[in-house]
């Protein structure tokens, strides 16, 4: 098995950034992952981690799926097929970022009101924990075969994509350890999915009923696993992966 892709999501729910290499530390999320989030009007104004339903996310606004992003520290550059490119230094340019994203967010949803930082160790992760999300390319291939179209890995917003395992083998890794390059992780739980995965990362339209396919063909609504870093180090695309 080997690592084929690495991803970071500096702004929760909006955009993704492909990496070639990253340095991971024990009991911490991928550096810069979900470092910022856009809170909507129904969210709670509070410091620290908050649940994902208080922020803009693709499950509620599918057009967000087509945002691409690059980062330079806390300066983020966002592009979208329906918007001009925008460059924002956070937190100073939070209001401008909200103006940029507003046309992509449904008017029927609570309006975006603030760009807020996530906790340093976890980011504004969905599960509130300092974990990485790992996807299995073979499972994605099995899902694509049932869908009748290639299902893009970007729909599932994983940090690490691996290839060379059997389809759905990752569900048998819960409680076990993996070595990936120079790091070791402990797989903690499966990831149950929401409607965010139905939206195309190219167009932002819901065009594949991923949840129905998972339920009807595989008997669950899960894709990928969370893992905790138990021994940090450098990780790069192409590194070997093995059960420890």
Image (cartoon, rainbow, N blue to C red):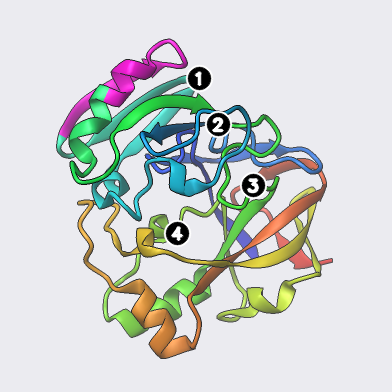
111 sits left or right of 126 in the view:
left
Residue at position x 29%, y 44% in the image: 64
Q: Circles 2 and 3: CB distance less than 8 Å?
A: no
Q: Position of residue 220 (x, y in %)?
A: 50, 82
Residue at position x 64%, y 47% in the image: 128
Mark drawn on residue 156 = 4
Q: Quadrant of residue 11?
A: top left
Relative depth, front residue between 23 and 194 = 194
Q: Quadrant of residue 236?
A: top right
Question: In this orientation, does residue 169 appear?
Answer: yes
Residue at position x 38%, y 74% in the image: 211
Q: Earlier in the sequence, mark 1 or mark 2?
A: 2
Question: In this orientation, does residue 144 appear?
Answer: no
Tell me how many marks there are: 4
Q: Earlier in the sequence, mark 1 or mark 4?
A: 1
Which residue is disc 1 drawn over? 74
173 sits left or right of 3 in the view:
right
Relative depth, front residue between 235 and 142 = 142
Q: Earlier in the sequence, mark 2 or mark 4?
A: 2
Q: Position of residue 186 (x, y in %)?
A: 79, 60
Q: Position of residue 51 (x, y in %)?
A: 54, 46
Q: Which residues are magenta?
A: 83-98
239 sits left or right of 103 in the view:
right
The span from disc 1 to disc 2 (Cα, nearest Å) is: 9 Å
Which residue is disc 2 drawn over? 35
Mark drawn on residue 128 = 3
């Amino acid at each position: 098995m080997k690592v084929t892709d690495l991803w970071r999501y500096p702004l929760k729910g909006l955009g993704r950034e492909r990496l070639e290499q990253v340095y991971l530390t024990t009991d911490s999320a991928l550096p810069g992952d979900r470092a910022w989030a856009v809170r909507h009007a129904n969210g709670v104004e509070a410091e620290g981690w908050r649940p994902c339903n208080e922020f803009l996310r693709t499950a509620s606004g599918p057009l967000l799926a087509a945002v691409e992003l690059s980062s330079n520290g806390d300066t983020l550059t966002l592009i979208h097929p329906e918007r001009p490119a925008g460059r924002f230094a956070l937190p100073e340019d939070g209001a401008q970022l909200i103006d940029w994203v507003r046309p992509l967010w449904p008017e029927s949803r609570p309006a975006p009101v603030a760009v807020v930082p996530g906790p340093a160790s976890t980011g504004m992760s969905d599960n509130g924990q300092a974990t990485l999300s790992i996807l299995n390319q073979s499972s994605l291939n099995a899902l694509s075969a049932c869908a009748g179209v290639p299902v893009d890995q970007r729909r599932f917003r994983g940090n690490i994509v691996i290839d060379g395992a059997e389809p759905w083998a990752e569900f048998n890794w819960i409680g076990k350890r993996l070595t990936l390059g120079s790091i070791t992780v402990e797989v903690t739980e499966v990831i149950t999915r929401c409607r965010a995965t139905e939206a195309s990362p190219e167009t932002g339209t819901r065009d594949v009923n991923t949840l129905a396919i998972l339920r009807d063909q595989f008997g669950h609504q899960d894709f990928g696993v969370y893992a905790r870093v138990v021994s940090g180090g450098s990780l790069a695309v192409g590194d070997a992966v093995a059960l420890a």
